Image: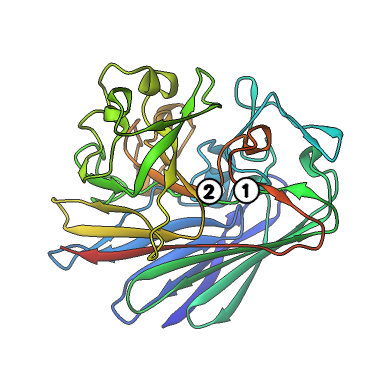
Amino acid sequence: MSVEKKIFGTLSDGREVSLYKIINAKGESVSFIDYGAAIVSIMVHDREGNLKDIALGCDNAAAYEQQTACLGAVPGRYANRIEKGTFVLNGKTFHLAVNNGPNHLHGGPTGFHRRLWNGEICDDNTVIFTRLSCDGEEGYPGNLMVCVKYTFDQASRLSICYQALSDQDTILNLTNHTYFNLNGHDSGSVEGQELQIFADSFTENDSNCLPTGRIVNLSAEEGRVMDFRSPKTIGKDLHKESIHLKNASGYDHNYVLEKNKEGIAAKAYSSDSGITMECKTTQPGIQLYTGNFLEDSNIQGKNGAVYHNFDGFCLETQHFPDAIRHTHFPKVILKMGELYKETTEYSFGIK
């Protein structure tokens, strides 16, 4: 195992961005940048023994600054949506930016995915990114110290550990926003790739992609197009008539994960490349997003790639969107002095 570090370019204000690359003995690797603590590439072997980069991304810092798809980054303080950019905590109303229709999304226009983190190589397979989110940043209360630890091992497991502490009560929801394509980042649509999600229900969205508070069982008639309990291709039901798909222009939904003891959240597979991916997590939900608006996201793809809608899928492990408004959702309040800790692991293989 080894870790390399190099310059990845500069931001518009002149600050330098660094890229960190963890390489295992098989020659497989994962690369990250300190801008947004983002995953830039995931290089794994296909069944023919060729290395494939299965993460959508850009070639330099300037391109990451310009794109609006949150490519590979850690959004925050609150990943996903908050209705009308307001929430009440301890009797006080807090006002956040509205940057997604009527919603606050991914921590606002300068959320964690738009910040330069402090990067550090810890050993031969681990990189840690940290930052202090000051009281009032994007309207959130409390000085929050955040740490994201990435580890990649010989078994081709990418582990992400999130930790945070605040000196005031606040709300927090951290995830990673990598777009996967198991045939390679520049190979086109993921609709033919197979997905299984270990969830029996999902949180219904309204037309603004906000939870209504209703949890829909996948066994219900209306849940059929949303059902990934058994493996099926992403595109099988993607374009069918359904209010749930219409509201999100595809899949952009939070699934309520089963409490299986292995912590398995999802599995994916490409019959073309033979590449498999398994996702495990401690989080209660997972957002399936099928890249419904990639064409509108101002992306200059790696090696000149042009990304179209549905060319990548995200499996964002998380707490539920707008959970502060729904008391039956898992809690998202981080109490003063309480340690926030969640982990997610993506394992890659060949079938």
- The residue beneath circle 1 is 173
Left or right of 251 on screen, residue 214: right
Report x, y in % for residue 179.
Answer: 40, 46
What colour scheme does the image use?
rainbow
Q: Is residue 293 above or below residue 335?
A: above
Q: Earlier in the sequence, mark 2 or mark 1?
A: 1
Quick one: SS at disc 2? strand
User: Would you identify the image quadrant in which residue 276 lies?
Assistant: bottom left
10 Å neighbourhood of mark 2: few (<14), some, or many (≥20)? Answer: many
User: Would you identify the image quadrant in which residue 147 lies?
Assistant: bottom right
The residue depicted at 26 percent of the width and 22 percent of the height is: 239
Residue 177 showing in the rendered view: no
The residue depicted at 61 percent of the width and 39 percent of the height is: 106
State if disc 1 and disc 2 touch (CB < 8 Å): yes
Residue 92 showing in the rendered view: yes
Left or right of 85 on screen, residue 65: left
Which residue is nearer to you in this view: 158 or 223?
Answer: 223
- The residue beneath circle 2 is 318
The residue depicted at 87 percent of the width and 34 percent of the height is: 92
The disc labelled 1 sits on which kind of residue? Asn
Report x, y in % for residue 76.
Answer: 65, 46
Report x, y in % for residue 193.
Answer: 22, 44
